[in-house]
Image: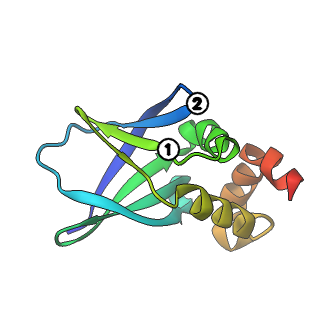
Amino acid sequence: MRKTYTVQKGTIQDSHIQFDLQEKLNDIKWRPAGQMITDSDDMSFIYLMDEEDGYSYVKFPQAVWPLLAETLQSKVNPMLKWNTEQIELVNFQDELQSLIYNIEGNYNYGEVFTTAVEEAFAELLSEA
């Protein structure tokens, strides 16, 4: 069964962005899958994590999108933190940037989601 974890907040430390999970996790064994998808109904980007029996989702809701935009400007993959553990989210920037470019003007994601992404990542899209 796939589990979903939600990023509660993010912080910038020494030019590195760190996202904190809302949930407390015990003995979780996962590794970054290096892939992202969207949940346009829930207005979220989702980073996939490999687990022993499949994938888990790390959900980035609209409240943390400003930090996602800063992540793209920093050129450094962010870290994901839970309890006392942390891990680098590999391929995060490439995946997120590809999704944003694909979403721009593409109402297959839904007009509300597409418009919100275009507004949140306007600076990135204007540079393209």
Around disc 1, counting alpha carbons within 10 Å, would you say few (fewer than 14), some (14 to 19), or many (20 or more)? many
Say if 121 sits above or below 55 in the image. Answer: above
Secondary structure under tag 1 reads loop
Residue for point 32% across, 36% down? 22
- Residue 67, position as x, y percentages in the image: 59, 37
- Residue 49, position as x, y percentages in the image: 33, 61
- Residue 75, position as x, y percentages in the image: 64, 47
| Residue wearing tag 1 | 78
- Say whether disc 1 or disc 2 marks the residue closer to the N-terminus: 2
The answer to whether 81 appears left or right of 77 in the picture is left
Residue for point 59% across, 55% down? 93
The answer to whether 128 appears left or right of 24 in the picture is right
Residue for point 24% across, 58% down? 30
The answer to whether 11 appears left or right of 82 in the picture is right
- Give the residue type at disc 2: Ser
Secondary structure under tag 2 reads loop
| Residue wearing tag 2 | 15
